[in-house]
Every structure is written in C-alpha cells, then in structure tokens.
Image (cartoon, helix red, strand yellow):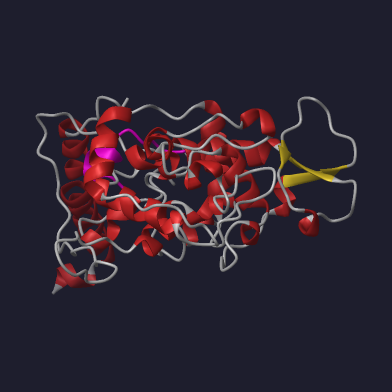
Amino acid sequence: MEYFNNHKKLFVTATSLFILLTLLVCIFPALDNQKNYEPLPNAKPLSKEAEMGKAIFISEGCVACHTQQVRNIDMDKSWGKRPSIAADYTGISRTDIWRNTATLMGTERTGPDLTNIGTRQPSTEWNLTHLYNPRILVKESIMPSYPWLFEIKENTLPTDIVVTVPDEYLPSKHTKIVASEKALHLIAYLQSLVQVDLPEATPQPVFLYKREPKPAKSTSGDEEEELDGAPLYANNCQMCHQANGEGLKGAFPALKDSKIVLDDDKPETMVDIIMNGYSGRVSEGYAVMPAVGVNNNLSAAEISAIMNYVKTNWGNNAQKVSSKQVEELVKQVKQ
C-alpha cells in the first residue's frame, strides 16, 4: 500500500508507461513505415508555387469538403485510375516544425475527391472561373465563391491573368476579374494533384463491388446495346460544355450546332478530340481541352455513348456511331 500512497512513484510509473506505449504504438511503427515505404518512382515533389497553394488550400478550409483518398470501391472509380495506397503519401513531409498538416486526406466528401484533379481538370481557365464563382460553370454547385482571391480592374496589364466571367457575374460594366497570386498558387497546387502510375511489377489494387453500366434502352434485333450517354456526358463533359451544350462564351465552345459534332463524314475528328484533347481554338480565346478519353480511361462504348448523346441533343441531329466503329477510330487516333 505504501507504493500507492507515494505520489512520486505513481507519477514516475505512469510517465514511464506513457513513454513506453508511445514508443511501441507510435514511434517504432512510424520509423518502420518510413524505412519500408518510399515515394513512387514517378512521383514529383511540389513546386514552390504549389507549396504556397497548399497553405492556401488549408487556410481556406478546402479540406473540410474535399478528400484526397480514392477508396477501393467501384463508386470511387471516377476519382482516380486506381485505389490509393500508402506509397501515395510517403513523399509528403511536415509543413514546418510547428505544423503537421502533411496529408490532406480529409474525412468529408461534400465536394468531389481531388486525388487526381490535376488530370481530370487541368484547365487553368476552368479552375479560375470555378474558384471565382462555381455557379458560373455548375449551376447546382454548393461550393462557396472565393472573390477575395481576385482583383477587380478596369484597366489590366499585359501580365494580368484575366478570368472569363459572363457579364451578369461582373460587379459592374467595363470591369474585368484578375486572378491574384494566391489564386494562381492555389490552382498550381490543384494541378499538381495527379495520381502516379504504379510500376509494372507492383500488384495493381482493384476496385471492389463493380457495377455494370446501365444500357440506355433495350434494342431489338441484332442491334448492339448502347450505354446511357447522359450520365457519361455529365461526368466527363458537362463541367465545361454545360448541361445545355452551349458552353461558356469566351472560355468553352458550344457543342450545340457544332460543325465537328454535325459532321457525319469525319467522326474520327470528334474521337480524336475526345481522346487527345484539342487546342485549335486557343487563338479565339477558348481554353485548351484536356485529353478526356485518355485521362478518364474511357472505353469505346463510353465514347460512342457520349458522342451519340451530343449528336442527338439540343437540336443536333447527326448520324450516330457504333462502339465498334469508335473502337477502330480510337486505334487510328491514339497517340
């Protein structure tokens, strides 16, 4: 009983147990992980601008709504090429001696996962417009606007990055929205979020509980079943070209009444643009289109469903294409 009445012995014992458990549960396993896990071979460290953008990402509370972890279930397949693994985070170090905030995996997915956003949406123009006011591009978006990351100017300098904003969203006529350095740094961080390919010898993690794509309608005879192009368009194209196919003036071209969409003689042009992206209208002020087909691993059936949806909506009345036809065209245009 004397031991329990001696506060010094009790304090020393409790402190010793705490230190021992800390070593066994935290320190030694962390050192072992650090020894056994290394960054993936193709992983790139953050640039100085991206590092500053990460600090802005944290200060603006973006991690409260966006995760950076692709789970190994099929419903997460749209966020990355594969499920996330421990090696994806091993190259991330502490912010500084006072702050950890190394990995920003998040716990809530109120907004889309950002693990591979640098591949899914690499357009600087789109990201800046979306950051200034998400409702310009996505009418139903619940993401807050960040106008304090931009400047309002009547006279711009050649070095200013002017954001494409429709007139109804401008504070007043004859003004322009210019991205601040903070906004550009934040976009640099988002564009750096790219899921690295695993080495060929590494076992590839798989998505579980796979769901079969739902055909649009049952067909009769020997006609092939066609996937529903509406959700595929919404997931891969709508953020830029809009739900009505009219795009955004001065930023993203319209698919409604598009000559390329309506050209029945050269469907390979449309396949090429979907697969490899397009920069032919930059001189007109339009943004560079990313390689959606390659970036999002779209199959021939999915590409044909998107094409047929675009070709037969918003007043468009073009000839449909088959998945077999698209499969051959993909081989031709593949870079």
Q: Position of residue 70 (x, y in %)?
A: 29, 53
**Residue 110 appears in view:** yes
Residue occupying the point 19% across, 34% down: 37
Q: Residue at x 60, y 32 (%)?
A: 281
Give above or below for 16 relative to 260: below
Q: Quadrant of the C terminus?
A: top left
Residue 120 lies in quadrant: top left
Q: How many marks?
A: 0
Answer left or right for 113 relative to 19. right
Looking at the rendering, in which quadrant would you find the N terminus?
bottom left
> What x and y, as percent, mark residue 101?
44, 47
> Magenta part mainly helix, strand or loop?
loop
Q: Quadrant of residue 43?
A: top left
Q: Can residue 9 be spotted in the picture? A: no
Q: Which residues are magenta?
A: 80-96
Frontmost residue, 238 versus 178 = 238
Q: Quadrant of residue 12?
A: bottom left
